[in-house]
Amino acid sequence: MNPNFIRISLLLLTTDLCFGNIIDVRVYGTHGKNTTFTTTIKPTSDPFFSVSWAVNGSFIITSTISNTIVEPKYADRTTLFRETGSLELRNLTNEDSGEYTVTIIPASGHLISGAAVLEVQSKIPTPTVTCPPSTEGMSEVTFLCDDGDTSNAKQWTRDDQPLLPSDRIAFLENNRILMLKGVNRTDTAEYRCNVSNLSDHEVGTCQLTVYYGPDTPTVQQHPNPAVEEERLTLSCASDSLPPAAFTWEFQRRPLVPGPQHVIAELDEDHLGNYTCTARNDLTGLVVSTVHTLNAASCNHGNSNECRCISALTNVCICICSINMKRPQLLCINVFMLAALALCPGQAALGAGSLTGVTGGRTTFETNLSLTDQNTTGPPFRSIVWLFNLNNIVLYTPAGSLVSPAYRKRISLNTTSGWLDLWDLTVGDSGAYTVDITTHTDQQLNGSTGLNVYERVSSVSVTPNTTELLEFNSSVRISCHVSTGTSLSYLWMNGSSEITVSSDRVQVGDGGTSLTILNVTRYDRGPYTCNVSNPVSNDVGRPLTLTIGYGPERLAIIGPSLVEFGEVTVLYCSAMSVPPPSYTWSLNGVHTTVQGPVYVIASVNSSDYGKYTCTAVNTLTDLSQAADHVVSLKENRCSAAIATTAAVMAACLVAVAAGVGVVVGVIARRVYKKSSYEITEL
């Protein structure tokens, strides 16, 4: 090549100059880290004639086939990939932010250019997450994520699972605060706050410990049943965090504390009630349970020498020895045992009470199993059933006498003594007694209780007011039932039980009312009232409160740069209950547009300027306004044509410097050939 003359002709057709941006229009980097401007060009077999990069119009690097020139301050911070034209920039600083342009002249001679804006953001420090230790039953616990920058995005996870808003989970201050409501022991977990911006990401962690318990203790006895003169251990256990401390009492006398009480050699003096008390000093809860230690009772097979000591209602009570120091009152008349296979200590009715429902039926079952029946006649000479010592029915083989109140309501099985009672009412609740005389003239009796309940029906919940304002209103929700007796009430907020009253949430009036003071938007519910008794339960229709707040976080979404004649839509949004009304103004002048959407059918010169959206909540009587500026978009292709000659001139200066020749460049347009001619001065 002749060094005194350099001639380069490049076609400058408009389609060639507007080839399209070959790099991302916006790139984000982090202070102190690296970033790469990656082009969309794929490597070819023919190397580029030249590649040049600049920032804000200032030279960074120019590389030709024969030489590369780098601005000194970028010498140790850049790497140019000539195969694609991509540029790596290292150890970023805030001063690196700006508009970067690349110009590539390939072997084909068609100019390729692109531009991108680099925004260098500060490195996110490791966020600090605070979560104070909590106790089960607390109304709420608050987590705080602090990274020093409220503009960074924040996301929360629990044991690596994302947390989403719910009845128990709320996020405040742009996710900076996580609020967990209705704390329980299952909330113990590792919580993470993931902080990010467009170029960086950091994680802060916090291990939440929820203290709970103690639950009601359970006592295990070994051996069971107890054996005289043998070692016996009582073990007390309760679920608690931290572990509970245990104390023991025997017949109200304190014993050695600890989870176990050991009796080295059991005798009669050790029999009785043992109380185990579990205490958690951190939660402040104390729970007790009672365990009764009994001796092994004698049975029909090994009972010895029983003798009658008294007569009670014609039933003979006897005593028998069980190898303890003193005899126990454990046996029913020994002569009765010959006719009825009854274990000593057993009566005609089982232990415990019966439960019934109004309008239903129940059966009083005896536990008699006959082994020596009189096969020539009925097994019983008489059966008498009493209710609160008043006659229900008297049976003898000669006939039956039924009280008028029970006619058509009872049925008596004369071979077992069982009594059926139907069409139950609440008035049938009380004590029932049976007295049976066998064909051998022996007598058995027993007593039990019956509790009759009316079914729960038509549960409903009503608030005392429906117009609620956040932080300024309180509400009292009442639970009503149409029918039901002996009622228990359970309030639910969504799927969470409301079991503990707090300064703001109170359950009163025997559980029939729920009061919430100074309501917040997170108190909306839904609330349900579960009413139950031993035979039924019913749940009212859920109640969701409408709590007015806002408008807040008003924002206008839409383009800032628009072209003449194009359709433009601006959208105004705000957090508000009820939804606000919207009005619009342009450059301080009110428009006729109402509603969240502002549509410009065809942009003209009068449509540029500052748009103001105002949101008004008529319930809270609050308003908020936001601004959005719409400007004319510059035509990038026309700007590229105007600057192409200057860029080419800069490339050629770099080439001349590489070969040690100082040249001047004059560019002039040859209209007939539609090319540039560059001639040495």
Image (cartoon, grey):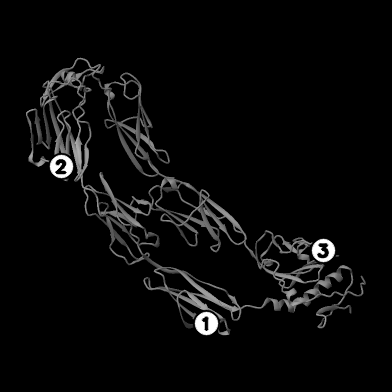
| Numbered label attached to residue 283 | none
Vertical order, 492 against 215 (above or below): below
SS at mark 1 in the image: loop
Question: In the structure shown, which secondary structural element does the residue marked by tag 3 occupy?
Answer: loop
Question: Compared with residue 629, is residue 159 higher up or lower down, i.e. above or below?
Answer: above
Taking depth in this image into account, of 158 and 8 the one nearest to the observer is 8
Judge left or right: residue 404 versus residue 291. Answer: left
Of the residues shown, which amino acid type is indicated by label 3? Asp
Q: Tell me which numbered mark, 2 or 3, is placed earlier along the sequence.
A: 3
x and y, in percent, of residue 446 in the image: 16, 30
Quarter placement of the C terminus: bottom right
* Badge 3 density bin: few <14, some 14–19, many ≥20, Cα 10 Å: few
The secondary element bearing badge 2 is classed as helix
User: Which residue in the structure is indicated by mark 2?
Assistant: 428
Q: Which residue is mark 1?
A: 587
Labels 1, 2: front one: 2
| Relative image position of residue 136 (x, y in whole percent) | 39, 47
Q: Which residue is mark 3?
A: 46
Label 2: few (<14), some (14–19) or many (≥20) C-alpha neighbours in 10 Å: many
Q: Is residue 403 above or below residue 4?
A: above
Q: Position of residue 332 (x, y in %)?
A: 18, 22
